[in-house]
Every structure is written in structure tokens, then in C-alpha cells.
Amino acid sequence: MQTTPDPTRESDPDPDPDSAQDPTRIALVAFPGIRAFDVSVITEVWGVDRTDRGVPPFELRRTAAESAPIALRGGLSLTPDRTLAWLARADLIVVPGLDDQPAPAPAPVLEALRRAHARATPIASLCGGAFTLAQAGLLDGRRAVTHWNLTDLLRTRHPRVEVTQDALFLHDDNIWTSAGTAAGIDLCLHLVRTAHGAETAATIARSMVTAPFRTGTQAQFIEHPTPRTDRDADTLAAVRAFALTHLAEPHTVAELAARAGMSPRSFARHFQATTGTTPLRWLITQRVAAAQKLLERTDLPLPEVARRTGFGSEITMRQHFATHLSTSPRDYRLAFHHPGQTRG
């Protein structure tokens, strides 16, 4: 991952006055020991120009305490193009995971992260990057997640952190942490979705050939004794496909279980083992996602959006938007509706 550096500098030119939209500034915090995979994920999400597909412009900078190339595992290297001072200009700061979790991060990095948090700049860490945030003291008294195989180590080394392993990513006081490896993709796409809407996140996800979001928790990936092959996996997939193509209809666990040829209890158990969540929680997540698309792409009245996505009423849809997205359908449409899209 040898990169060609721009001249290292503390500031950038003023935005082009003729530019339709100023880029969102993303700072990748680099130092010896960071994981090449996480650097690649951050670069793929924010470092590729997709404005021709309707994605807003991003400005991704590789920031470090020094300008010298940083060696990465596998014979790769990364060349910083900005110093840590550029974090003061960033709209979002992302910290990659580490190859060696207990290794201390450089003091200038920790101090720069503390200053950024004091300025209320959002900070996200991927996988073992939670250890870096913990070393900076940013996770003290806060909930955090990391790779399931590292949770005990994080608890031991940083007892003031409220470590959990039941999520793919977590948000606490403007700080985001994510579970291992692929969960870093989930978090990056979620940050895009939160700032720029579900359609933008979906466009990036399609170009990466990955899901815009995954349901469930990290629990579905934790190592357990291997059970017998689940002969009902295809049946469960077919049931989920049916529910997705009939979102407007009311669904109960009993009805979905009957379609799978199982008892409700057996269906719920197999469903959670496969997806990491319950049937009804999964269904609500799909309905919220479908409603997001309709709010972005159409001018349908809110009651009609609620009907088409199976919420039944605008009030119910509003309640689930508040729970899942911390906003209302009306405010979501104001923020992410694309003029010129299909009307109705």
C-alpha cells in the first residue's frame, strides 16, 4: 500500500467557490502497528471518488506525528500526507485497529485524540483501535466493543471501560467503536449512512460488493462448539426473502414459523442462531431500511410510507425511527430527500 504523498502541510486551500458541495473531511490516524486491512477499509469507503454516482465528495487525509512512511504488516507501507494538526480541520476521525493490541500508541497520537474529543469531533475506531482510544482515556466510563477474542484483554487492561461483545458497533458520547475485521466495514458504512443517507451508503456498499448493513450482533460469530449442520438454513433464507417482498403485510412469528414448517419456539431459536437477532427485531430493521429508501427517493406522504413498509401507522413508524435512527421520518426526509427522484 505504497502511497504517493502530497506535500505535508497544516492547512489546505480554501474550498473552490464554484464547488457545489464542500467535501466532508476524514482523518485517518496512522502510526506504527496499525492494521493494513483497516487502512484499506477506510480508504475504500472515503478515499474513492464516487461523485459521478451521486455520492458526496470526501477528503480523506492520512495523518501522523511524522511524515516518514509507516511500515504495515505484509511488506506494505503508508505515507502520511498531513500531520496530526490536521485533526483540528476534520469532520470525522477514524483510528485503525492494531496488529499487536497491547502495544502503546505514540504519546502525540493520544494527546491529539484527547484534544479532538474535547472539540466534540466524532471519533471512530475499528476493531482493536478501541485499545488506542482506551489508552487516551476516551473510553473511561463508556460502553465500547472490540473483536470478541479481545474483550477479556480490553477489560483487564482498561477496567474503567464498559466492554461489551453483543454488538457489531457502538456509539457513546460522540465515540464509535466496532467489533472485529468486517465489522469495521459495517461501522464505516453506518457513519456514511448517518451523515449522508441510506442511498449514499448503499451506493458505496454496492461498489464494494458488500451489504449496506448487517443485522444481528457479534454473538453470531463467537466461537462455540460446532453444532450439527442446520438443515433448515435454506428454509429460513426463503422465509426472510418472503418477508422482504411482503413488507407491507403484517407478520407474526407464528405465521413465519408455519411457513418454515417449524414450531414458533424452534423457528425463533434457529432464526437467532442464523442472524444473531430475533425475527421481529430483524423485521423492524428491514422496515426501517425500506422506509428510509422511500423517504429519500419519493414524495409519498408519510402515512403511505408507513403503510408500504408494514408499520401500519405514521406514529408507529416515527417511534421506530426514533429508536433506530434517533430522528423522525419527517426530519430524515428533509435531510436526505433527493430532488428529482421518483414522485410516488
Image (cartoon, rainbow, N blue to C red):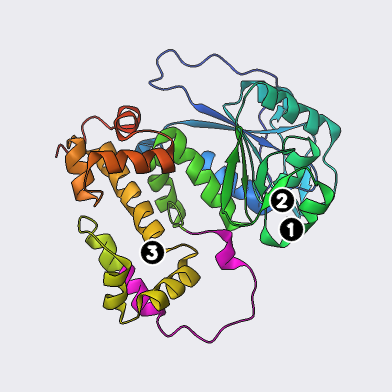
Residue 86, image x and y in percent? 68, 23
Q: Position of residue 201 (x, y in %)?
A: 42, 44
| Span colored in magenta | 216-240
From the viewer's perspective, is 316 left or right of 266? left
Q: Secondary structure at mark 1?
A: helix
Q: Position of residue 322 (x, y in %)?
A: 40, 38
Task: Please determine whether, in this image, residue 50 is positioned above or below residue 66.
Answer: below
Pointer 2 residue? 128
Gap in angstroms between the C-alphas marked 3 and 1 = 29 Å
Figure quadrant of residue 231: bottom left
Q: Residue at horizontal 26%, vertical 71%?
A: 255
Between 254 and 57, the one lying in front of the other is 254
Comparing marks 2 and 3, which lies closer to the viewer?
3
C-alpha gap between disc 1 and disc 2: 8 Å
Q: Give the image quarter of residue 344.
A: top left
Label 3 secondary element: helix
| Farthest-out residue, left | 344
Residue 308 to residue 28: above or below: below
Tell me if label 1 and label 2 are in contact, CB under 8 Å. Answer: yes
Label 1 vs 2, first from the N-terminus: 2
Question: Where is residue 292 shown, x and y percent of the image?
Answer: 32, 42
